[in-house]
Amino acid sequence: MTLSDTELERYSRHLLLAEVGRAGQERLRAARVLIVGAGGLGSPAALYLAASGIGTIGVVDCDQVELSNLQRQIVFGTEDLAQPKAVAAGRRLRALNPEIAVVPHAIELRAENVGTIFKQYDVVVDGTDRLGTRYLINDACVIFRKPLGSAAIHRFEGQAMTYVPGRGPCYRCLFPDATTATIPSCAEAGVLGVLPGVLGTIQATEAIKLILGQGELLVGRLLTYDALEMRFREFPFERRTDCAVCGDTPRITVPADPTALCRDEPVPLRRLSPRELNALLKDSERGGPAVWLIDVREPAEFSAGHLPGAVSIPLAELERGDWTPAASGEIVFLCRSGTRSIRACVIASRRGIPEPSHLEGGLIAWAAAIDPTLHVA
Amino acid sequence: MPSMNCTVKVASPLRSYTGGAASVTASGDTVAALLADLERRFPGMRFRMIDEQNAIRPHIRLYAGTREIRHLADPMGEETVLHLICALSGG
């Protein structure tokens, strides 16, 4: 179908480019792009892909819009608070460009649904904020032969790479496994709001080039960006013949959900609210059972402020295993927001501690409910 | 021959060990020697990159300039910058 008069006007700056032109614009309109994660990366990627005239955009996200998202997740407005992200993003994209279709997938991407969803799209953009889901997306793209524009961010630093089936290495060739890694999320480590804007637009650019068949893609090249230094760097990497999913003899042939450690799947653990922990500590002071507070944050975070009596054992050291739990009493893991402390519980559970405890909501929740003078870095 | 001084560019998730510094100097002719020097000055940092079997962890990549380092015994050669790259999770 040829472009309408409205489309000819809307995309006129594209049509002037020999690399796009009418034929290219029609290819963009016929294309179906899936964005996994309507967050910091997914927001700018989705907005530019919609503005560019990608005919069908799918958005996978099972979360709701929170106020703390709006510092960087520019596809949402204040009026979208508490709305499902996939739906709110769809509304904004359609307002930007009513010529396109948007398909909200307000679900969590899992091994059981990834095939059904991915098969409906031509290109996948990974804007997720969980390492485990990154591997699920990568593996599914290899298995279902879908090109992937991948990026990730942390504080002031970002990375991007592109995978094209049969043409180069995948994300697992770059980082074969990260299930034992302790890499804080944006919620824990913070992120410069504009940082995902840079990386998300790179992902959108790659998706558009893929569809147009133009230019040189980030295949076999890891692009890094340091916003503080204002410097891009590039590191080559090759397909690994022993890659678990795209290697010569792949061990992963169907998508699998991330491991329990990576997904923070429930183990028998006790979730203490700040008030419950406070009561336990007071009881302990009065001669009740001992409470061992183990703060699993990074040393610098601990130094900035911690609970009285807490011991600092960063999560990485906990994983190393050079830690002997006390013989009696209750062990309570603490971190900033209650994510790392769950991982600590998973590790402790595997070390034979029957029901480790953690502070739900972390020290942020503690400061809000019990002690506003506690400085939480 | 004195050991070579190199610039080490530190991945964002590892900067808690370097007091937030993105770039530090270290001394050594091989990657192993450089990492040992880093560990002396920033205790605990090496373990975040290298496992108990002296293998580079699978979510870490090391580059001498733009040359990938697969083994700790690899020499730095003419390169004077070691890049510590870490998988990132944020989105």
Image (cartoon, coloured by chain):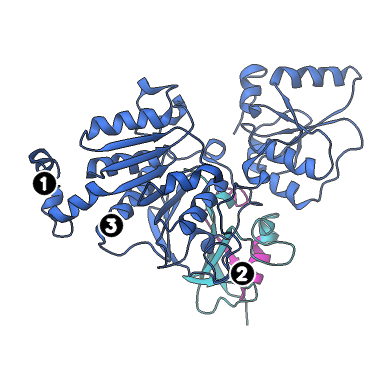
Chain colours: A blue, B cyan
Q: Determine if the magenta segment contains residue A121.
A: no
The magenta segment is B15-38
Instruction: Classify 10 Å Cα crowding around label 3: few (below 14), some (14-19), many (20 and above).
Output: some
Location of residue A100 by image quarter:
top left
Labels 2 and 1 share a subunit: no
The chain letter under disc 2 is: B
Q: Nearer the viewer, mark 3 or mark 2?
A: 3
Check residue A12 in the rendering and tell me which mark sits there, or answer none: 1
In the picture, the disc for residue A287 is none
Q: Amino acid at mark 3?
A: Lys
A164 in relation to B17, above or below: below
Question: Please, which residue is most extreme toward the bottom here?
Answer: B1
For the question of whether residue B88 can be seen, the reply is: no
Discs 3 and 2 lie in a common subunit: no
User: Which of the two residues, B35 or A274, is positioned nearer the viewer here?
Assistant: A274
Q: Is residue B66 visible?
A: yes
* Disc on res. B27: 2
| Classed neighbour count for the residue bearing mark 1: other residues with Cα under 10 Å, few (<14), some (14–19), many (≥20) | some
Residue ID at (49%, 45%): A114
Residue A163's x, y, as percent? Answer: 42, 60
Q: Given the image, what chain letter belongs to the residue carrying mark 3?
A: A
